[in-house]
Amino acid sequence: MHLDVQDLKNFYYRTNLGRVAQRAVREQVNEFWKSWKGETVVGFGFAAPLLRPYLADARRVVALMPGPQGVMHWPAGEPNVAALCEETLWPLQSGQADKLVVLHGLETSENPSALLEECWRVLAPGGRALFIVPNRAGIWSRRDRTPYGFGRPYSLGQLEAQLKKHNFSPEKHLAALFAIPSEKRFWLKAANMMESFGRKVSGRFAGGVLIVEATKQVYAPRPKGRKVSVRSPLRGMEGTPAPVVGRVTRQD
């Protein structure tokens, strides 16, 4: 079940905890991608909070939001690059995206397999995708006061296995949101310190979200009618007279 776009907007842009989450996840995303100049960057779900750094240098930025969630104008005060779409039918050509970010999309999807197939279709050969999901072992997935407490949380093994099943090759993973998901002033002030400490201690278990970078697997087509070489002929008919090729006459 997708969350409403207004609830997501209010969390990330109007609450202190949402700003903490936005900053922590965005910093880890920046650890994966250092360059995106001249590339097409696509976000799906509610990836808008992570896409702003790409607006200046990317060739094109598109924020796709699924119909059950709803859409909002983004970025505020600038020409809109957000679009409403079907969850498994995006208004993009195959192989158009150089980079893809999926946030609040996979864990809330009613058909994750079809969604991953659409991600694979849109991603260019050699393109890279980031899948950001709630961590099953993290505390954020147990608190429904944030968007990370909804949908199906994943373990790292579960996410990577699902990606491999749909022809993605997981390359690298990181975790984020080591802070306590609380609006109390003490925990908000301690958030940066906890993020820094958590990244040094664990990149998998304690974080509230898992971030997996994957590439698109493209297999070379096999030509039809490929010849098969046989090292030696079969010898099972040795001793049998060879057939005589000639004119056949009818005998009454």
Image: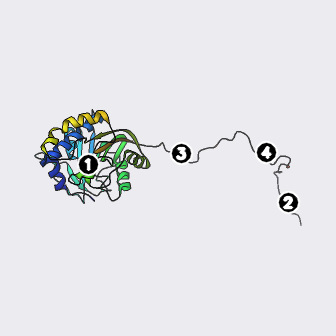
Can residue 36 be seen here?
Answer: no
What residue type is disc 1 on?
A: Trp
User: CA gap, disc 4 to disc 1?
Assistant: 70 Å
Pointer 4 or 3: first along the chain: 3
Q: Nearer the viewer, mark 3 or mark 1?
A: 1
Q: Secondary structure beneath disc 1?
A: helix
Question: Disc 3 designates what residue?
Answer: 223
Labelled disc at residue 140: 1
Residue 58 percent across, percent down from the top left:
23, 38
Nearest to N terminus: mark 2 or mark 1? 1
Image vertical order of residue 224 relative to residue 68, above or below = above
Quadrant that contains the N terminus: bottom left
Q: In the image, residue 14 lies at what x, y percent?
A: 12, 48
Q: Looking at the image, do the residues carrying marks 4 and 2 touch, with CB atoms under 8 Å apart? A: no
Residue 181: give x, y in percent of width and height: 21, 47
SS class, disc 4: loop
Q: Residues within 10 Å of mark 3 (few under 14, many from 20)?
A: few
